[in-house]
Amino acid sequence: MVRTFDPNLSLEAADLACIRDDRVLFEHLGFTLATGELLMLEGRNGSGKTSLLRILCSIRLPDAGAVWWCGEEVQRLGPDYHEQLSYVGHKDGIKQDLTPEENLRMARALGRPSPELDIPEALELFGLYGFEDVPTRTLSAGQQRRVALARLVATEAPLWILDEPFTSLDRDGIGVFESVMETHLERGGMIVMTTHHRVALEGERVKRINLTA
Amino acid sequence: MVRTFDPNLSLEAADLACIRDDRVLFEHLGFTLATGELLMLEGRNGSGKTSLLRILCSIRLPDAGAVWWCGEEVQRLGPDYHEQLSYVGHKDGIKQDLTPEENLRMARALGRPSPELDIPEALELFGLYGFEDVPTRTLSAGQQRRVALARLVATEAPLWILDEPFTSLDRDGIGVFESVMETHLERGGMIVMTTHHRVALEGERVKRINLTA
Amino acid sequence: MMRFIHRLASPKYFYDVAGRIVPWAGWGALILILVGAYWGLVEAPADYQQGDSFRIIYVHVPAAWMSLFIYVVMAAAGAIGLVWRIKLAEIIAIASAPIGASFTFLALVTGSLWGKPMWGTWWVWDARLTSELILLFLYLGVMALYGAVEDKRMASRAAAILAIVGVVNIPIIHYSVEWWNTLHQGPTVTKLDKPSIAPEMLWPLLIMAVGFQLYYVATVLMRARVELLERERNSRWVQELVQPR
Amino acid sequence: MSALSTPRAMALLLRRDLLLAYRRRAELINPLLFFVLIATLFPLGVGADSRLLQTAGPGIVWVAALLAALLSLDSVFRSDFEDGTLEQLMLSAHPVSLLVLAKVFAHWLVTGVPLILVSPLIGVLLSIPSRAMPVLVASLALGTPVLSLIGAVGVALTVGLRRAGIILSLLVLPLYVPVLIFASSAVDAASSGLPVGPQLYILAAMLVAAVSLAPVAAAASLRVSLS
Amino acid sequence: MSALSTPRAMALLLRRDLLLAYRRRAELINPLLFFVLIATLFPLGVGADSRLLQTAGPGIVWVAALLAALLSLDSVFRSDFEDGTLEQLMLSAHPVSLLVLAKVFAHWLVTGVPLILVSPLIGVLLSIPSRAMPVLVASLALGTPVLSLIGAVGVALTVGLRRAGIILSLLVLPLYVPVLIFASSAVDAASSGLPVGPQLYILAAMLVAAVSLAPVAAAASLRVSLS
Ligand code: HEM
Ligand SMILES: Nc1ncnc2c1ncn2[C@@H]1O[C@H](COP(=O)(O)OP(=O)(O)OP(=O)(O)O)[C@@H](O)[C@H]1O
Ligand SMILES: Nc1ncnc2c1ncn2[C@@H]1O[C@H](COP(=O)(O)OP(=O)(O)OP(=O)(O)O)[C@@H](O)[C@H]1O
Ligand SMILES: [Mg+2]
Ligand SMILES: [Mg+2]
């Protein structure tokens, strides 16, 4: 039986604004995301997608508005909120001197370990079989990105926040990761992401916000 | 009148090999590239594309074989070869504390300034109008990539070596850069590049090498 | 001649030749060192000023000479490897470093053991002692740099550059006793015209020195063979070598 | 599966940092070598008068220790910041201040402890009398963790604020001064055969204060630096 | 349009590096601050016996200068390496060794010159007699460029390594020792009213040798580090 996440989870944002150097990137931005839904942030280069994602993670404070997780403000939840989310940013967030395996072990220590996939399985899923015990610095750009993404499946968090996850991936890699996202949504997970690629996920569960407009 | 490059230029490689940590990435690799041609390197993550590009730039020594520019070995040409090429790697190669304009000025000092486009025009071409005098660090990932690419048109080099130039670009940006490459080839330039995206350039002038095979 | 050099530069040929030299040099070193030690420590007369403590000279001086000699060999081999990209030279250079470091250490230790009875202190900050200590740090630096770079081909080239830069220290060590008036002994043995040392003391010293040389040859070739196998482990000749026949 | 307990996560983080240090074991002895090098540079610069050295000895050892700590500090957060793993730490399910404590402890184990072990040797090179050696070792054992802890706050501030380099020197070094003064005066007193209790008690008190306050301050600084 | 002449490219690179330093002007005074702090920490650690200080003074100034140089070295190539601009330099149409020379010159202007300017003040703090001040300034003027040049080779060798800070000091400090010895002995001699010609000539010779050799060695090292 496939475990599912609590169906009452929700991520809400209202009236968010972000101002950088006097330029208003966005204002009055709000949305609600329920389980099984994907929020796709679109917009041109420099439209504020990364800034918004960092606000949703609570790494950055919004210039107005607030973000709620299951009805509570994320700033006040602190580690309790962080336990529920996994973030993959423009930077991979892996240690170059550790092996992929050690990197994932650390990720599991910081979050919640996944009960379904252990570390070798997670690496295998992303085609890193045979590379699990070399220093990550000796991997190619795409392989490093795969390690960062493997973190998502080696831990268990209902909310994924992804900033251009497909960067440097080859077509195989993109295919694999799309099916991983698919599964996550089916299990009742949520995803907020940006990408300039076309993504194969469609349907009602995909919401879109365009920051350029 | 559009200036064209010397039609006798050529880039040749023969019997190249690259070995990393005992793994042979490629062997007996050779090609010839004439003016107006594009060489597209394909291959999965970790197949050795970046390594090959760095060998072609003469940043890295091949484990076997050699590369020739107009019949002379590139290792021996040194700066004379470097004057003929522009390289955009995985890293942008721009200084975060300088403005885009200052970055391009430096690029022009290190290579050959383009006689056709001055710096503001090059930035304008890549949609960076209005950002020419803010520190590059405050630009978004895609905007930074655009600055790196603007270097190609602000200087004049017949050979472009590009490692996934489309990273972080939005669709507009991709369109612009494809037409820039088109023009470069028509003027008799040469391009060696990798990408996991589909590129709109086709025809006889596009050669392909697949490193996975 | 060129053909011979070319053949020697081929890894497999070098591996075989070195394998044949090692036992000769090794046994030679052992015999010479034993003879020299017996002659020096037992037979040779005691010094009229220093008594028996002078006998440490038979270890100290050859070790100090070796520490300088090996550094020069290392830097020269490094330079050859860097300019002509000869793999064997790189390997010789890097194999020399730990041996040279040990001889330097030995020279420092025996020197300060000798210093205690002679100067009444283990250590003074005089020019020769200081520059020899710097030599130790240079050796350590070369080894640390080599160890820190992942790609061994790059590592040996980086280490070679450092070794070459450090060569400036060698004349400083050698001439320090002339350039500055120091506590340390001036040239006694190496004066060109006539050594100011009794022949009964000189002979065992020279025998020890040759013994140390042979010891270096044996160990450096051994280390080089190991390093060579490791770097060439994918090549055909190594595969054939390790294949059980 | 629920999240690991916080102590367990701290232990794993500690292990990770030690492992990282071990991966670069060639560099592991480096703070140590740096310490030794500085301690030998001084006699070279100052001249080899051994009476002079003896008076200056404790000061030199402690200034060297302080600089070795300062130089190795960067590694506490800088590389984590640059590769994005610091973001991951901040987004972990555990209180950041405790994770910081684990990281600082790892830093101390890797840079402070070797200094303590090698200090008697340096003491000999600098002609510190042997009756003062135990006090030298004790003062380092109490003092170096304080250096790591205070330093962590400084680095946490400098890691994000691009121009905060100045804050590191301005904030950290002056805070180091009391440690330096009490520690080297303890060693001085011991060389002259005077009691050293008061100085060591003060150092111990500093250690307690630093352990309880510095991680919280560092965590807060990191949060500011990252946003 | 053909490429710029090499001297012009060097001038532009120099200008760029100075501009970058100016952009981070808050960090600009960092090495200086460090220099001042060390020079003041010593009296604290050593105790304020002024006869002792006077003998130790030149050594302390020079050790401080040497450490300040060491600390600021990283900035010569490190940040260029990390953002990929170093690759661009290596692929430029000009000889790399000359570009390196321009960068080192910028580094010296930013870190060495302020030290020289402030050194008389430090000299007073450490009770160096005023007749030795000109020699102190002269020794710094001849010596600090050598430190920058030698340091550039070390940084070029270690730029590819993470956490190279301390391995760097292991490589560079031994090579710094001769500068330290001659420079501080010059100041010592001047304090005692002895002639200082020989030492200063040797420093000048070192400078000439370093200017001609170090850029070449650094360029070769960069080529190795990048490949
Ligand atoms: C830690 C202390 C010492 C160190 C580091 C040291 C270092 C050296 C070095 C590097 C050499 C070789 C110089 C060359 O060939 O250019 C040497 C040679 C020599 N040392 Fe020492 N030494 C030390 C203590 C002593 C002491 C205490 C004595 C005896 C008083 C001594 C006597 C000699 C002699 C006789 C030579 C041979 C000189 C010649 O003819 O080349 N050394 N030492
Ligand atoms: N610094 C290094 N040290 C050792 N091995 C390396 C290093 N860099 C890359 N490699 C190895 O070389 C292989 C090829 O890497 P390269 O970066 O050339 O791949 P790539 O084709 O560019 O991949 P991508 O599409 O992910 O960018 C990798 O699998 C990696 O194992
Ligand atoms: N550190 C910063 N300081 C000041 N302004 C910044 C900073 N980072 C980003 N900005 C500004 O915020 C704008 C939005 O940046 P952001 O990174 O959010 O864009 P993005 O939508 O993620 O773009 P991309 O598609 O290129 O990744 C940029 O145009 C930039 O000018
Ligand atoms: Mg972005
Ligand atoms: Mg690549």
Image (cartoon, coloured by chain):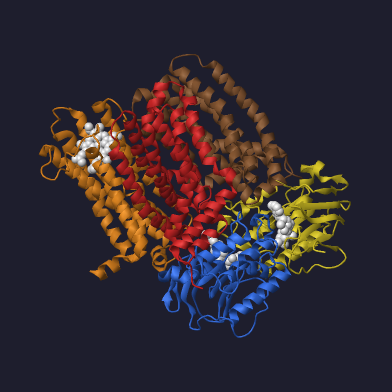
Chain colours: A yellow, B blue, C orange, D brown, E red
Residue A11 appears anywhere in the view = no
Q: Residue D97, position in %: x, y? A: 69, 37
Identify the residue at image location x=56%, y=33%: D173
Residue E75 appears anywhere in the view = yes
Q: Residue D108, position in %: x, y? A: 56, 35
Q: Residue D171, position in %: x, y? A: 60, 34
Nearest to the observer: residue C233 or residue C163: C163
Q: How many marks?
A: 0
Nearest to the observer: residue E145 or residue B22: E145
Q: Is residue A30 above or below residue C129?
A: below
Q: Quadrant of residue D33?
A: top left
Going by the image, does C88 lie left or right of D70? left
Going by the image, does C127 lie left or right of D58? left
Locate ligand 3 by image quadrant. Answer: bottom right
Quarter containing the C terminus of chain A: bottom right
Nearest to the observer: residue C44 or residue A140: A140
Q: Is residue C50 above or below residue B210?
A: above
Q: Is residue E92 above or below residue E180?
A: below
